[in-house]
Image (cartoon, grey):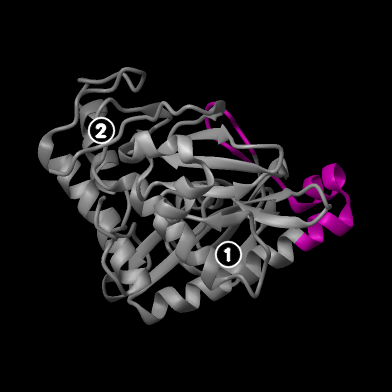
Amino acid sequence: MSATVAGSSLPLSLWRRGKVREVYEVDDDRLLLVASDRVSAFDVVLDAPIPHKGRVLTQLSAFWFRRLASLCDSHFITADTDEIIAEIPALGAHRSQVAGRSMLVKRTVPVQFECVVRGYLAGSAWSEYRRHGTLAGEPLPAGLVESSELEPPIFSPATKAHTGHDENVTFSRMVRDLGEELATRLCELSIAIYTAGRDVARERGLIIADTKFEFGVDRGGTLLLIDEVLTPDSSRFWPVDKFQPGRSQPSFDKQPLRDWLAGERDAGRWNGESPAPTLPRDVIEATSARYIEAYQRLTGSDLPAED
C-alpha cells in the first residue's frame, strides 16, 4: 500500500488540529490546510491511516471549488504543491508532508452552523423521521421510506460540535442566531451548490444523497464557501445503478470501516470508545479504494500521482 501521512508537523504556527486536518497560520490573511490520512468513525479517531484519503479530500475539494466558482466565492487559493511551496519556501524541506494534501486558503471567521442539504432520507434524518415523522423538528410527508428522494432538497442546518455529533436544528433557530438575511443567504447558496454538484455527479453515475457545507466571512465582509466540498467525508455518495429505496445504500466512503467496527461492537469485542480495535488490512484497502473511486468518478480523471 501507499505511504500514509498520519499527521503533519510544519515550521508554521499551528492554529488548529482537527480529526483529519491540521490548520496552520501563514500570515494575517491566509491559512494552510493539510489533510492527513487519519480517519474517524463513531466519533473515535482510529490508529490506522487510510492511504490516499488526505489527497482525495484535498484534490476533490479543489476540483469543486473551481467548478462551482460561478455560484459562490470561496476561500480557495491553490492546492498545487509547487505553488504552495513557492509562496511558503520553508515548506520545501517538508514536501512529503504537504504534497497533494495541502491547500492554501483565505482566512475567514467561520459561521457557527453546518449547512446541511438532504436530497434523500438517510442517516440521522431517516432515524428522526422514523421516530417522529419530522426532520430537525419540521414535519415531512407521511409514507416515506429509507432512502426516499426528497424533492425539492431540504436545507437542514446543524450546530457545529467540536466533540461528539452535530445537532440538527430548525431553520428558525438559525434565523434567531444569525439574522434572517444571512440565514436565508446560506440556505439559498447551500441548495444551489448541492443542486449543481448533484447534477454533475448523476451524469457520472453517482447520487449525492446529502452533504454539508461550511461558510466563513472574510475581512472585507464577503461570505465564502470554506473547508471541504462534496467529498466522501462531508457527503453520502451512492451508485446510481444500485439505488433501491426502502433500504440503506452502498456508499463511496468509509462504509467498509464502519461496518467492520459495528460488527466488533455488536460482538462485544469493542465498547465503542477510544481506542478502537486495529483495522484489518483488507478493510483499510477497501476503504482506500472507495475514496479513490469516488474521486475518479466525480472528476473523470485519476488521482494525481504522489510526488
Mark 2 secondary-structure assignment = helix
Query: Is 252 located above or below residue 286 in the figure?
Result: below
Q: Quadrant of residue 300?
A: bottom left
Instruction: Residue 6: tell me if it is visible.
Output: yes
Query: Is 23 located above or below residue 228 in the figure?
Result: above
Q: Which residue is painted at 48% across and 27% down in the image?
A: 11
Amino acid found under the numbered disc labelled 1: Ala
Q: Is residue 171 magenta?
A: yes
**Relative horizontal placement of residue 43, taking residue 268 as reference (left or right):** right
Q: Which residue is painted at 83% across and 55% down in the image?
A: 182
Q: Which residue is painted at 21% across and 28% down in the image?
A: 264
Q: Contact (CB < 8 A) between labels 2 and 1?
A: no
Q: Earlier in the sequence, mark 2 or mark 1?
A: 1
Q: Which residue is painted at 45% across and 40% down in the image?
A: 34
Amino acid found under the numbered disc labelled 2: Leu
**Relative horizontal placement of residue 114, taking residue 86 as reference (left or right):** right
Residue 95 percent location from the top left of the image = 34, 40
| Residue position for label 2 | 261
Residue 26 percent location from the top left of the image = 60, 37
> Alpha-carbon neighbours of circle 1 within 10 Å: few (<14), some, or many (≥20)?
few
Q: Is residue 187 magenta?
A: no
What range of the chain is rendered magenta?
160-185
Query: Is 94 located above or below residue 124 in the figure?
Result: above
| Residue position for label 1 | 142
Residue 183 percent location from the top left of the image = 80, 55
**Relative horizontal placement of residue 81, taking residue 49 as reference (left or right):** right
**Residue 249, which numbered label?**
none
